[in-house]
Amino acid sequence: MTKQTITALLVDDHALLRAGIRVLLSTTDHIELVGEASKAEQGIQLYQQLLPDIVIMDLSMPGIGGLEAIRRILLHDDQAKILVFSVHHEAVFVNRALQAGAKGYITKNSAPSLLIEAINGLVNANTYIEAGLLSHDDIGEPRGDHANVINGFSPREFDVYRLLAQGLTVNAIADQLCLQQKTVSNYATQIKKKLGVQTFTELAHIASSLGLLSHSRI
């Protein structure tokens, strides 16, 4: 008995990674890659056109980013099944993705076979989280005063905060996220006020303590 074909959309800004996943999925007899996007905005458009069974979504991309893309896809289709495929393994990233509406999460350093397993898991069981990413105590992370504030950030605030903490200027962040400089400045002011800090160095210290700076964008 042949398996029903699973259609997948891949959203990631790294061409080599997309090529690798394309080859990997071509080795299966039941998963078909029907579309690819290098930007989140393009991924949202393709989802609406193709209505794939599953979306494989990176988090860190130029433009609106993966978290906001997840939210917008779910606004269009609350039954969408989105699997986050990210370099970030910290609980704060996993929880934010799940809060945005993702149904699964695996890391890019996992074995290739895990991607196939995760796709099957989402289609068959509606959820799949890579083993070891979340302990029972991690569910609902982050904890602590600053961490709880960050947990309440909107997807856009979270993206701006991470980039500020990495040392990017307002101008550079505006270019990367395709926002007006004034908009980014307003976000920066709001973020510092919410966290009760005055400087970008303090923002970076908080981010480092929560493990948000442990990886460069991949």
Image: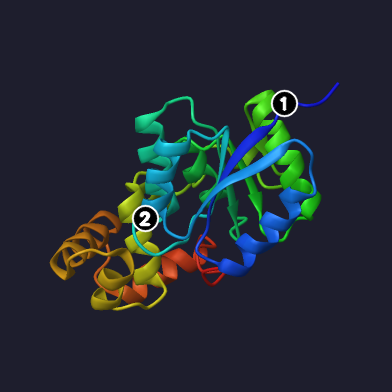
Q: Amino acid at mark 1?
A: Gln
Does residue 27 appear in the picture of this structure?
yes
What is the C-alpha distance between the residues marked 2 and 1?
Answer: 38 Å
Measuring from the top left, give residue 187's x and y in whole percent.
Answer: 22, 60
Measuring from the top left, give residue 95's x and y in whole percent.
Answer: 52, 43
Measuring from the top left, give residue 191's x and y in whole percent.
Answer: 26, 59
Q: Residue at x 36, y 52 (%)?
A: 41
The N terminus appears in which quarter of the rendering?
A: top right
Tally of numbered tags: 2
**Mark identifier at residue 4:** 1
Q: Looking at the image, is mark 2 or mark 1 nearer the viewer?
A: 1
Asked if 57 appears above or below 183 in the picture, the reply is above
**Mark identifier at residue 158:** 2
- For the residue pair 106 and 73, the one nearer the viewer reads as 73
Q: Residue at x 72, y 26 (%)?
A: 4
The C terminus appears in which quarter of the rendering?
A: bottom right
Residue 7, image quadrant = top right
Residue 62, image quadrant = bottom left
Helix, strand or loop status at disc 2: helix
Q: Amino acid at mark 2?
A: Phe
Q: Residue at x 41, y 28 (%)?
A: 77
Helix, strand or loop status at disc 1: loop
Does residue 148 appear in the picture of this structure?
no
